Image (tube, rainbow, N blue to C red):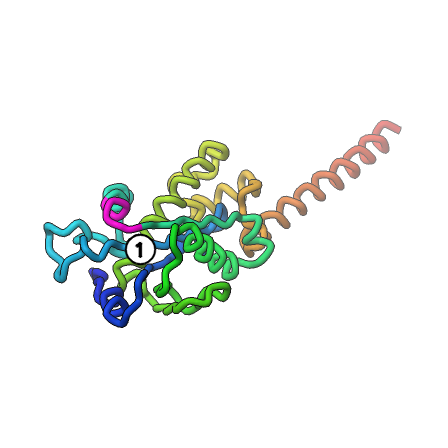
Amino acid sequence: MKFPTYKHETQKYLEGFKVVAGCDEVGIAPLAGPVVAATVILDSQSIGRQRSKNKWWYRVRDSKTTNEKERTELIEFIKDNCVDFGIGVVSHETIDEINIHQAAMLAMQKSAEQLKVLPDYLFLDGLHRIKRFDFAQEPVVDGDVKILSISAASIIAKVSRDKILAELHEQYPNYGFVKHKGYGTKEHRAALKRFGVTPVHRTSFTFVQQVIRSFCSFRNFEKNYGVILSEAKDLISV
């Protein structure tokens, strides 16, 4: 298992940058719910030079490699040992309006804008910079695996989104949101086929569109079948 380091942030501070942050998003692939991003400024004084078991950040890594119990513990360590963090949420409605890529970038932008002070250097997980910002940015592929502040951001974003999906589960218990978090699992797809699309599903996503079309076709069939059956009964009664 790979663990991130703080050397990228340290290098930027040595180059003269004053506020270095990491940003990541979660929730691009799910069929339902928002996309959520977080931006984190870690306290360099609490990091130290080497990873060791007595360091608070020893187990901090990409949220995809952690379980729910670990994330619940790690998020408290991160919050206690960062200068600041921000969270950005973009709804499923906006995802459908502007597409998932633009929505993810908007969530990242919003998370950075929640900081008390904008960074002058921002590491982002992925391939793209945030167009609205004119300060220095560096997109890093697999940044959540390599860069500690991005890994920390991924955990905050993941825990925040999971909380939202748990709340959606209370509204729509038939779909299992609390378990699969809106991702297109076999269970989730089966629920969609059985119960149809909820108001929190992403209607621009292909599988959701397929479900909508199938339900519309079935309703049209029911309507037409009802007319045919009624006419047949009238003919029999004549």
Left or right of 23 on screen, residue 208:
right
Q: Residue at x 25, y 56 (%)?
A: 61
Q: Quadrant of residue 18?
A: bottom left
Residue 64 visible in the displayed image? no
Check disc 1: other Cα within 10 Å, few if <14, some if 14-19, many if 20+: many
Q: Is 78 within the magenta?
A: yes
Task: Out of 133 and 30, give the one closest to the viewer.
Answer: 133
Which range of residues does the magenta coloring cover? 77-83
Which percent across, then down, holds residue 125? 36, 63
Residue type, label 1: Ile
Left or right of 163 on screen, residue 231:
right
Q: Residue at x 11, y 52 (%)?
A: 53
Which percent across, then down, holds residue 134? 46, 67
Classify mark 1: helix, strand or loop.
strand
Task: Out of 237 and 28, give the one closest to the viewer.
Answer: 28
Which percent across, then down, holds residue 235? 85, 33
Q: Is 112 within the magenta?
A: no
Task: Out of 112 and 128, give the one closest to the viewer.
Answer: 112
Q: Which residue is mark 1?
A: 41
Q: Residue at x 34, y 50 (%)?
A: 85
Which percent across, then down, holds residue 161? 40, 45
